[in-house]
Amino acid sequence: MADWVVIASVMLVYLAIVMVIGLLSTRGREHSVDEYVNAGRDLGFFTTYFLLGAAIFSAFAFLGGPGWAYGKGAATLFILGYCATGLWLFWLFGPQVMQLGHRYNYSTQAEFLSDRFESRWLSVLVAVVSIMAFIPYMTLQMKGCGYVVSTLTNQRIPFELGALLSYGVVLAYVFFGGLRGVAWTNVFQGSFMIALAWFLGIYIPLKIHGGFEPMFRKIAEARPDFLLIGREGSMMTHQAFSSALLVSFLGFSCWPHFFMRLYNIRSERVLKKILVGYPLFAIFLVPVLLVGFAGIGYVDLESKGMDADAILPYMIQSMGLPALVIGLFGAGTLAASMSTQDTITHAAATIFVKDFYAKLVRRDLNDKEVMWWIRIAVIVFGAISYLFAVLGGESLVDLLLGAYGSIVQLLPLVLSAVYVRRATGPAVMAGLAGGVTTNYLIHFQVVPSSYALGIHAGLWGLGINIGLIVLVSMVGRPQDPRHLARFDLD
Amino acid sequence: MKKRNLVIFYFALLLAGFLWPGMLIANRVEPFVLGLPFLMFWFVLLIVIQAVSLLLLYWAEFRRK
């Protein structure tokens, strides 16, 4: 049998397994919006842990992460830093948000914020900011799938078909299985890719360089500053590294697909158990980065006209590994991409219907209609992302990086909603709009980057954001204390 | 309430280990630990300390119940 047939078969078998798990997961459950969107608000430790973990193991884990290590050296440590600290803030405001979520049956971030600040338009604004961040995110996952499938089968399966396959499988189990389908497939996909990452991360550096230390010594001899931050020969300055890490730390827990999990978890105890275990996902990522470092000195991708992100697939293919292993690697990359794509598709569709459509266009939707609209939105958002993935769009990476700086703008709103009674609706809307605008203006260099002093655009946005919230709240009228009393905690 | 502030301060300190200027003390290649350059080892070490700290915090909070 030709190698590409074996490789393609392994990936197809993998896709079939995921689909079956996704479809079986909801058997015996009731058909309701609450089940579809929130998995009955009763998810335990195991499923939620992987649900949150698999969402960061995106296509970035197997393609971008090693690419960063290979091309940017120590700058890649930024990924470890934010992954380890990203959910800390949940320890602070998570229990409160959980309690209110259970009390008022929220399913989205915007439902909580717009209820607290008595503003329908806030909900619409938050939905727009979220979806603008989600579309490039989903598109990049599909591109990752298409790229890996086509590269590993030597283009026998074209890019378009590879991306379409992953779209189809994700669509099927999100459409029928809802959040529970996503959760159980993520348990499988998460464990699978962690096992694979450790195998590759230890095997490849040992095979090529005879160990980690000899590998790093070689790199350090050739380019002494490459493994450091902020030196002359480093690939990232101190300002850029620290401010990017800070923005990711602050913004991570505000990504809607993470925040929404607060409404699905069974209890505060389960939440905190997850937070204890979460930094382990950062440790799981270490081997993936090691493979990227192993590529230095092994191949010069630039001279071949290839992108740094291609480092891992390139190495896997060039090392004379058995076709079965190459196929498993392909499946692992699909796992990483799809387990992010599904969570985000589910969140984007829910947000679009509940926070945008039902607030702006049809305010009289009943539960059954909500569920069907969400399912339609799942298909449509998938299709939009697929079109973007196929039609190119090189600037997508840039768009996604910009999105991090705009998502972090939600943090002052969440904190005000929980802790600051004096903060008002118009104030937080002004803050969010100002923060997001500032971020994108600097990110896309409408404001010359020299003005930003090399500091992450999201931090400047945060400054404007907080300033506006304080100022407009001071000028405006406070909210009715009787309304605010609804948000008192037990 | 005082205990809570202390906990926040402690975790802020751990976070500062990743950031300028805290990370400057580890911004070097030598010595290698576990085969990793020192800066990378520093990140891994901090992550392990963070996980253990969170575990202690969890125990402190839920042992009573």
Image (tube, coloured by chain):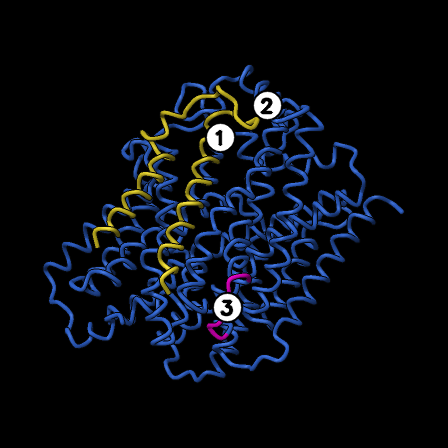
Chain colours: A blue, B yellow
Reply yes or no: does residue A41 show up in magenta.
yes
Q: Residue A403: in sight, yes or no?
A: no
Q: Compared with residue A281, is residue A484 higher up or lower down, i.e. above or below?
A: below
Badge 1 is on which residue?
A: B40
Q: Disc 1 on helix, strand or loop?
A: helix
- Mark 2 → mark 3, Cα distance in angstroms: 42 Å
Name the foreground residue: A285 vs B64.
Answer: B64
x then y, percent, for residue A213 = 59, 23
* Dots 1, 2 in contact, CB < 8 A: no
**Amino acid tagged 3:** Leu
x then y, percent, for residue A152 = 73, 43
Badge 2 is on which residue?
A: A213
Q: Chain of mark 1?
A: B
Q: Which mark is residue A130?
A: none
Q: Residue A202: in sight, yes or no?
A: yes
Circles 1 and 2 on the same subunit = no
* Dots 2, 3 in contact, CB < 8 A: no
x then y, percent, for residue A191 = 62, 53
Reply yes or no: does residue A184 show up in magenta.
no
Q: Residues within 10 Å of mark 3 (few under 14, many from 20)?
A: many
Q: Which residues are magenta?
A: A40-46
Find residue A182 and report its image quarter.
Answer: bottom right
Badge 3 is on which residue?
A: A43
Q: Residues within 10 Å of mark 2 (few under 14, many from 20)?
A: some
Name the foreground residue: A115 vs A386.
Answer: A115
Q: Residue at the far front: name it.
A: B64
Name the foreground residue: A372 vs A93.
Answer: A93
